[in-house]
Image (cartoon, helix red, strand yellow):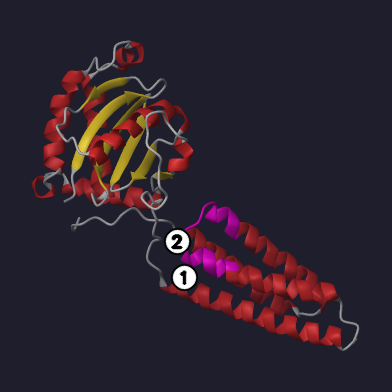
Amino acid sequence: MSLILSASVVRVRDGLPLSASTDCEQSVGVQECRKYFKTLAKKLAQLPDRCTLQVGKYNINFISSLGVSYMMLCTENYPSVLSFCFLNELQKEFITTYDMMKTNTAVRPYCFIEFDNFIQRTKQRYNNPRSLSTKINLADMQTEIRLRPPYQISLSELGSPNGLPHISLKEYKAPHQRLVPVTLSGIVSFVLSLLCGALNLIRGFHATESLLQNEGEDFSYVIAFFLGTAACLYQCYLFVYCTGWRNIKSFLTFGLICLCNMYLYELRNLWQIFFHVTVGAFSTLQIRLRQPQGKSPDYNV
């Protein structure tokens, strides 16, 4: 069952809790996840303004704005778009209700605990998606998450906070982000990249054969052909899989394709070089356009 379990409002600069929901969920997994709230609260100033942390069968999502962070704990199958709509509602209500000067000067934990009444009412609505009256905003949030997905925090980034049990890699796997669906132009770029890789591979074998037959073939040409093959295949890999620094890697790979074709200027005519470079640029563009997507919601928006 997908549910929001708890939520809290925390000051970013020092992690001071300003308000929190009063929950009666006492399972071991939830109690352990709440310990991560404290660890995250101490690191909010170092993290992006929209993040997700997966801990076992639960997700911790939060957004930060104007020095205040709004955090929530939910089950792993709770739709991401609903999670961040829920946090946005908390943010709007908190900013409207309380003077930011008071939040900045607060010294006592939970000095805005009365905000829990709004948290509880909002949580009940979002735990019953059919009762939501703001579905028109969900489509906007889904688009925003697709264009700017939340930063996925890894457990290793949090270190080993005091009081937390040893984390088993088998028990807690990093969340896998899916890419947006493949388009026709993306398929074309993938096929053309494979074609360029195959052409480079064939020419590389021919250059190797010529070198072995002592026909004066330069060994550096062999390296350039095989590097070109590797670059084309790596572009295909980047197009299919979501990896860290994906866009930067795609630009560096395209640069390698350009360098290899510049070096092979004497062995290829201008049209061949133009074809390889154009395919490389086209594939780089498709990699850039195929960005990670948020978790798919469990209902139509």
Pointers 2 and 1 in contact (C-beta within 8 Å): yes
| Residue drawn where x is 28% and y is 26% of the image | 9
Crowding at mark 2 (Cα within 10 Å: few <14, some 14-19, many 20+) = many
Tag 1's secondary structure?
helix
Inspect the magenta stretch and tell me whether residue 235 lies in it. yes
Q: Position of residue 280 (x, y in %)?
A: 61, 68
Q: Amino acid at mark 1?
A: Gly
Q: Which residue is mark 2?
A: 290
Please tell me which residue is depicted at 77% across the width and 72% down the height of the picture: 223
| Residue 119 horizontal side relative to residue 156, left or right | left
Q: Which residue is mark 1?
A: 186
The percent position of residue 178, horizontal first and vertical second, equals 39, 59
What residue is rendered at 32% in x and 25% in y?
10
Q: Position of residue 87 (x, y in %)?
A: 26, 36
Q: Mark 2 belongs to which amino acid?
A: Arg
Q: Is residue 159 left or right of residue 221?
A: left
Position of 156 compared to 127: left or right?
Answer: right
Residue 211's place in the image compared with 45, above or below, is below
Badge 1 density bin: few <14, some 14–19, many ≥20, Cα 10 Å: many
Q: Up-down: is 181 above or below 296?
A: below
- Residue 216 picture location, percent across and down: 91, 83
Q: Is residue 94 visible?
A: yes
The CA span between labels 2 and 1 is 8 Å
Magenta segment boundaries in residue numbering: 234-250
Mark 2 or 1, nearer chain start: 1
Above or below residue 248? Residue 108 is above
Q: Magenta stretch: residue 4 in it?
A: no
